[in-house]
Image (cartoon, rainbow, N blue to C red):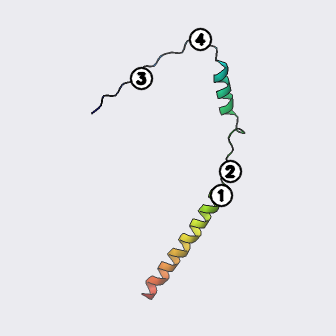
Amino acid sequence: MSKRRKRKNTPRTGSKPTATSEAVTSARKSPDSFNPDYSYVKKDLQTIGILAGIFITILVILSFIL
């Protein structure tokens, strides 16, 4: 078994944020920056649901026939 090393928590020095950290935090807070389109996923899930319903109906009908 391999030994795992624990990370040491080191406090950050300096109280002033850098320009890159300001850009990252402002990008995370803005809801307009990440807006994916999942319309194709919704259509695929509807198709899967319809097919599942059809197959279950066929199986129920076949259970009465056979």
Give the alpha-carbon distance from disc 3 to disc 2, as whole Å.
38 Å
| Three-letter amino acid code at the position of disc 2 | Asp
* Residue beneath disc 2: 37
Q: Quadrant of residue 28?
A: top right
Question: Residue 55, relative to residue 3: is it above or below?
Answer: below
What residue is shown at x 65% (from left), y 58% (from top)? 40
Q: Position of residue 33 (x, y in %)?
A: 70, 38
Q: Kindly state the secondary structure of the residue where label 2 is placed.
A: loop
Q: Kindly state the secondary structure of the residue where label 4 is placed.
A: loop
What residue is shown at x 55% (from left), y 75% (from top)? 54
Name of the residue lying farthest toward the front: 2
> Are dots 3 and 2 in contact, CB under 8 Å?
no
Q: Kindly state the secondary structure of the residue where label 1 is placed.
A: helix
Residue 7, numbered label: 3
Name of the residue lying farthest toward the right: 32
| Three-letter amino acid code at the position of disc 1 | Tyr
Give the alpha-carbon distance from disc 1 to disc 4, as whole Å.
47 Å
Give the alpha-carbon distance from disc 3 to disc 1, as whole Å.
42 Å
* Residue beneath disc 1: 40
Give the alpha-carbon distance from disc 2 to disc 1, as whole Å.
8 Å
* Residue beneath disc 4: 14
Q: Position of residue 36 (x, y in %)?
A: 67, 47
Q: Earlier in the sequence, mark 1 or mark 4?
A: 4
